[in-house]
């Protein structure tokens, strides 16, 4: 048994935010039916290179544990099929621009008429209300508007986006949390469903946490600090003799004591300019260059070894080749393999949540476009000839 066995999810999403949400649900047992446009499917099927065979690496990364059904939702017959599916679905997830599902006659108010217990989650850039509701949104745009790019990058340098699509992935994670919260509420309220309006902008603003707190406290917008921390020193990346970088996180004065011991610089420990974190923050401009010069005497891994030996948080800055050969990553099964119907064995990132009693798993490979049309439609009572007629009419 998996924790979400028996939960049926209709997934009308594409790109990343919605597919990441439904990936999380599918990994833990939900039956996710991915609804795609006939002939083209999810936009990310064509996002490449790189491709593995005919499939884009991007699509393969976030669409396992799903079944694919093609439906042309502009067609009334396809809308009827969807309503049949929705009648006993637990969850509908969509990430169209607000208003589009209403034009398909498949918005929340319509779906709840056939299924009052449905949890209907709409993910959009700016939400279903407000002056920006109809604006298009992609991750990079949202990283800029939300403030994330303003605090990412080197001091005095250009704003930078984070190296993965955190606005998309973050919204997908918030959506999965919201759906599970709504399902929990439904279980305790005689089966009452609800609509979820989830905005990428809201999701990113919520992530501002302590950076927002600094702004509220000072009235000054936080600035970019590269790999450094705004209120802890030293808490950043340094370069070793070999040109490799490593991170150090001195998050308390107790760790500062051990840090000085680990690098054999007790003179720094005795210096009144560095006696506590407040002093170190005030003297950041002299302490950080001093440490960087000192760290050029030895290779990065040597410093990491010495600091870890005295229980100071330190670690290498790995590239993904390092990550997926790391013994801890391998031990935690964060690199997995599964068999794809046309590609053979493909690699996937693992499942980050380890349940003791109801673990998730990789049960279905990322689907081919429309791979499960016959399987799903016949389960709804359509005959083989009716399915063939839908194909001929462009319904599926």
Image: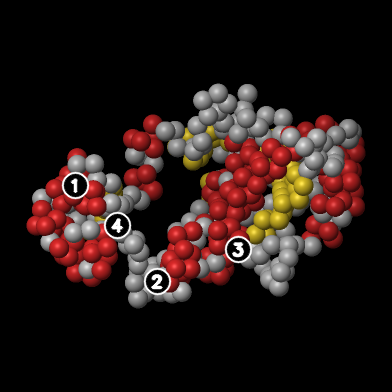
Is residue 273 in view from this perspective? yes
Q: Report the disc number at residue 228.
A: none
Q: Residue at x 55, y 67 (%)?
A: 146
Q: Residues within 10 Å of mark 1 (few under 14, many from 20)?
A: many
Structural distance between the alpha carbons of marks 4 and 3: 28 Å
Q: Which residue is mark 4?
A: 235
C-alpha distance separating marks 2 and 1: 29 Å
Considering the numbered disc 2 on the image, is that residue within a helix, a strand or a loop?
A: loop
Q: Residue 201 bears which disc, if any?
A: 3
Report x, y in % for residue 348.
50, 40
Distance from disc 4 to disc 2, alpha carbons, whole Å, reads 16 Å
Residue located at (50% from left, 32% from top)? 354
Counting residues from the start of the chain, the first of labels 2 and 3 encountered is: 3
In the picture provided, is 74 more to the left or to the right than 69?
right
Per the image, label 4 sits on a secondary structure element best described as: strand
Of circles 1 and 3, the one toward us is: 1
Q: Would residue 305 be seen by someone viewing this image from the given angle?
A: no
Cβ–Cβ below 8 Å for labels 1 and 3?
Answer: no
Report crowding for label 3: few under 14, some 14 to 19, many 20 or more residues within 10 A (C-alpha). many
Q: Is residue 195 above or below residue 187?
A: below
Q: Which mark is residue 223?
A: 2
Q: Is residue 280 above or below residue 343?
A: below
Label of residue 258 in the image: 1
Task: Decide which of tag 4 and tag 1 comes sooner along the chain.
Answer: 4
The tag earlier along the polypeptide, 2 or 1, is 2
**Lateral position of residue 126 relative to residue 57, left or right:** right
């Amino acid at each position: 048994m998996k924790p979400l066995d028996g939960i049926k999810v209709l997934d009308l999403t594409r790109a990343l935010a919605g597919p990441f949400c439904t990936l999380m649900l599918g990994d833990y047992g939900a039956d996710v039916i991915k609804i795609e446009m006939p002939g083209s499917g999810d936009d990310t099927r064509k996002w490449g290179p790189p491709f593995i065979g005919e499939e884009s690496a991007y699509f393969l990364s976030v669409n396992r544990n799903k079944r694919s059904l093609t439906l042309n939702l502009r067609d009334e017959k396809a809308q009827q099929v969807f309503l049949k599916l929705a009648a006993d679905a637990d969850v509908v997830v969509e990430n169209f621009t607000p208003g589009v599902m209403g034009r398909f006659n498949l918005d929340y108010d319509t779906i709840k008429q056939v299924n009052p217990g449905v949890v209907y989650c709409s993910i959009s850039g700016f939400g279903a209300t407000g002056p920006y509701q109809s604006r298009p949104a992609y991750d990079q745009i949202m990283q800029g508007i939300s403030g994330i790019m303003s605090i990412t990058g080197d001091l005095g340098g250009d704003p930078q986006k984070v190296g993965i699509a955190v606005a998309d992935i973050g919204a997908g994670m918030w959506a999965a949390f919201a759906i599970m919260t709504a399902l929990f509420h439904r279980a305790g309220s005689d089966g009452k469903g609800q609509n979820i309006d989830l905005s990428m902008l809201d999701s990113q603003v919520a992530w501002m946490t302590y950076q927002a707190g600094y702004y509220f406290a000072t009235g000054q917008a936080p600035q970019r600090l590269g790999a450094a921390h705004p209120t802890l020193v030293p808490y950043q990346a340094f370069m070793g003799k070999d040109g490799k970088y490593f991170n150090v996180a001195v998050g308390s004065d107790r760790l500062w004591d051990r840090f000085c011991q680990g690098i054999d610089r007790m003179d720094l420990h005795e210096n009144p300019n560095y006696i506590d974190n407040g002093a170190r923050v005030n003297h950041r401009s002299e302490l950080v260059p001093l440490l960087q010069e000192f760290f050029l005497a030895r290779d990065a891994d040597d410093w990491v070894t010495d600091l870890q030996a005295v229980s100071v948080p330190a670690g290498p800055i790995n590239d993904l080749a390092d990550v997926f050969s790391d013994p801890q990553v391998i031990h935690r099964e964060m690199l997995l393999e599964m068999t794809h119907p046309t590609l053979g064995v493909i690699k996937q990132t693992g499942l980050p949540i380890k349940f003791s009693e109801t673990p998730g798993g990789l049960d279905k490979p990322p689907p081919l476009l429309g791979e499960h049309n016959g399987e799903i439609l016949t389960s709804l009572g359509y005959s083989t000839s009716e399915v063939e007629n839908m194909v001929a009419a462009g319904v599926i």
